[in-house]
Amino acid sequence: MTHGRTAMIAGLLAITGCSTPPPPDPGADLIARGEDIFFNETFRGNGRTCGTCHRAERNFGIDAFFIAGLPDDDPLFVAEFNPNLRENFEKPELMRGFGLILENQDGFDDLENNFNLRGVPHVLAQRTSVDSPSGPRTGWSGDGSPGDGSLRSFSTGAVIQHFPLTLNRVDGVDFRLPDDEELDALEAFMLSLGRQEDLQLPLPLKDPVVIRGQEIFLDDSLGKCNICHVNAGANAIVGGNDLGNANFNTGVEDLPDQPARLTGAFVPPDDGFSTPGDGTFNTPPLVEAADTGPFFHNNAIETIEGAVAFYNGDAFNNSPSGRILASLDPNGVGIRLDATQVVAVAAFLRAINTLENIRESIDLLQKSMQRSRSSRALDLLERAASETGDGIRVLEGGGLRPEAVARLREAQREINEAIRGFGRRKHTELALIELRWARKDLIEE
Amino acid sequence: MPRQHVKLILAAVLAAPAPAAFGQKATELYIPIGKSPGLSGKVTAQGRIECLEPLDRSISVTGRAQKWTATFTQRTRIYLDRTGMRRSNRYGAMADCQPGLFCEIKYEGTEGSDAGAIEWIKIRVTEEPGSRGLDPLAHGLARAPRAASPPRRAGPRLGGGRWSRPVPPPVRT
């Protein structure tokens, strides 16, 4: 960075007064308690915590590339070194190769044959993506929780499924179940993560490809994306009816050449919601999509462009959802986009993902400036660096907005300087300014 | 087709009532009586089984303050809670609902209820069926999961609370 630019930013700092920290969040203590449980509590099980799979530095999910960098004694690999979990607890080669985790959605009476292999969904924006008129929708198929099916109860099912010392799964022996206070805290923490409200589309975006992508996304006769992903979120509003987080059978299970199956490994069909399943899966939010691949419940598609292109294919257009769309289309078409249109929609998703990265980074940096404890501030700074890095990768991956990428790189550099400790406040404030410049390159303000 | 009609039809299709979720509710099997989050102590009923009427597919249960009758359906799931014996819980059958056993019942529907169709029932088992002269084949305890549960071992623990690794990890491919 040039001296002139530094001086300009320093001047802006004085003018904007952005060093004033925002007021503390209500319920912060409960959220902090939940965070501690999320990352540190093993519930006297096999050593895993919630954070074993939902990694903060990986957008509260996990993927094969991240897994490849973990040491062999990481609790994620417990099936490889706990003899009681060697069989029918995980499929280690598919976990390492594709980030797939074993689940027994349809019961525990035939562990050899009756299981599903699913990716780890991020837990961002839960506040906007769980509720529906027919009850809460958790997990990939909307039925992830025991008990009352709520997000609060989700942790109980996760401990039973993923934390046991043995497959006997006896409470008090193989794990202990979370108590009410812990469930409250975990729920509060999960609800605090990421976006707290949906976007209001259309946004005043700047890039012509991104703008076109947004138009296609919102066009109910072309992209048709906004029917089920209203405002690029996880909810559907159709004909004035708010369906909330609805389930759809989009035919993902019918995709040919799914990567995990190409290995020759036994990957049972996943029947989705309920038992026996109805083939439906619930709708994930799209704002967070571009940096949380691979996509769909089975990690079948690696890129956001591929995920958009899925809706052009036979698997979707022959599915119940595709057929409904086709039956309502004057030309009998479900979804049909040309390659440039696929890329445009993906570019739009990349842009809104980056805007969310920037929003989250700013929020984390501001919170870091409020923290008196250095270790806590450091955690927040590291998460902000990770978020900013995601924004860089998401834009670069789509060949989008070089100026915004440059600003994000500068912000990341400042955050890393803040992490090193010397002049932390100054570097954090400079990073905030760079992030705001990056946002200005993406959207009219 | 007019756009408004399209939206109305789509709304009707998509808004069709969803069935009650089960799925990962499968883990309910391993939740002991009284610990089901959001349900126990709120919308479930607990008491002792007074009598089972196989022909009616009904059960009478005496709770702390009242007695009630509940009905089994094809959808009813029966869990045998063996946590007190420090043994793995099992799926059960209607025949396991023997008089005198303590149970917890979740009725169908999201609201609390004290009668009607049973969504799930948990039966507290405190002794093996054979010890009471019952036929294990007629009871859920004889229908253990086909995958044999590995023997439970305390196993050595390292300082960090993680399991020691008895064999090298498999070679990555």
Image: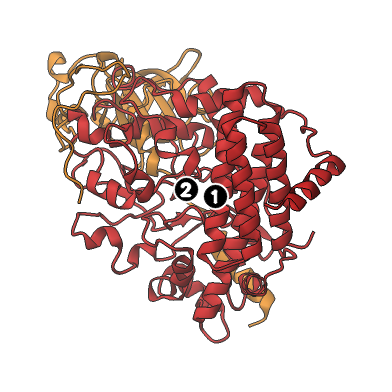
Chain colours: A red, B orange
The residue closer to the viewer here, A429 or A274, is: A429
Q: CA distance from mark 2 to mark 1?
A: 31 Å
Work out which quarter of the rendered image holds the C terminus of chain A and state it: bottom right
Q: Are marks 2 and 1 in contact (CB under 8 Å)?
A: no
Name the amino acid type tagged 2: Gly
Residues marked 2 and 1, same chain: yes
Q: Position of residue A411 (x, y in %)?
A: 64, 48
Task: Tell me the subunit letter for badge 1.
Answer: A
Q: Residues within 10 Å of mark 2 (few under 14, many from 20)?
A: many
Task: Tell me the subunit letter for badge 2.
Answer: A
Farthest residue toward the bottom?
A: A331
Figure check: A207 above or below A200? below
Residue pictured at 33% horizontal, 28% vertical: B30
Name the image quarter holding residue B8. bottom right
> What residue does disc 2 label?
A142
Q: Which mark is residue A389?
A: 1
Name the amino acid type tagged 1: Gly
Figure check: B140 above or below A106? above
Name the image quarter holding residue A111. top left
Q: Is residue A38 left or right of residue B103?
A: right
